[in-house]
Image (spheres, helix red, strand yellow):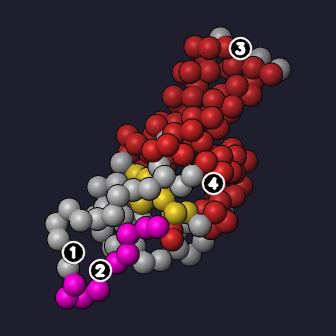
Amino acid sequence: MGLPATGRGSLAPWSRRLGALLIDWAASMVVAISVFGVGVIRDQGWRAWMTMVVFLVERAFLTALTSGSFGQLLSHVAVVRLDLATPVQTAGSAAPAGSAAPVRPIGWWRSVVRAGLKCIVIPAVIIGADRRGLDDLMLGTVVVNRR
């Protein structure tokens, strides 16, 4: 994929990715309960979907603006377009310290579609050989370490 083996810009480990997902879901639950009441947990009507709606909006909005959701920011991972990711340095051409390319947001439409696919779940749990979910493969994105 042209990503560094370790450090900033390398493929993020599953532990951080799963941790970010759990943080995002917990934060979405807290916000949904705060805004819509405990019916979010108990009711079977429209309130039952409010955690998912908050999760989708939070992930789409923050990923579009900062290349990561709330949980991803806390877990130090970012979602970047693979075609804009930092290229691997070839042997003998070491880059100066601190010269890694900045993390670039993936844009609004990719962010919204990616968040929606996460809510559907199935595209996110079908994993390819390069440790990317079907959603990332479809959108040309990858989850990398921020540091």
For the C terminus, which image quadrant? bottom left
Give, as a three-letter code, the residue at label 2.
Answer: Gln
Residue appearing at x 62%, y 21% in the figure: 32
> Badge 3 is on which residue?
39
Between the residue at mark 3 and the residue at mark 4, the CA separation in whole angstroms equals: 32 Å
State which tag comes first along the sequence, 4 or 1.
Answer: 1
Residue under the image location 73 percent in, 48 percent down: 120
Q: Amino acid at mark 3?
A: Gly
Q: Is residue 129 above or below residue 7?
A: below
Along the line of sight, the residue nearer the viewer: 106 or 131: 106
Which of the two discs, 3 and 4, labels the residue nearer the N terminus? 3
Q: Are marks 4 and 2 in contact (CB under 8 Å)?
A: no
Q: Estimate the spatial distance between the alpha carbons at disc 2 and disc 3, rounded to whole Å.
A: 53 Å
Q: Position of residue 91 (x, y in %)?
A: 24, 88
Q: Earlier in the sequence, mark 2 or mark 1?
A: 2
Residue occupied by mark 1: 95
Residue at image location 33% in from the left, 64% down from the top: 101
Q: Is residue 68 left or right of residue 111?
A: left
Q: Secondary structure at mark 3?
A: helix
User: Image check: 131 left or right of 54?
Assistant: left
Q: Which residue is mark 2?
A: 89
Callout 2–callout 1 Cβ contact below 8 Å: yes
Judge from the rendering whether residue 19 lies leftward or rightward of residue 61; answer left or right: left
Frontmost residue, 30 versus 145: 145
Q: Which mark is residue 110?
A: 4
- 144 left or right of 22 in image: left
Alpha carbons under labels 1 and 3: distance apart: 54 Å
Where residue 1 sits: x, y (%)? 47, 77
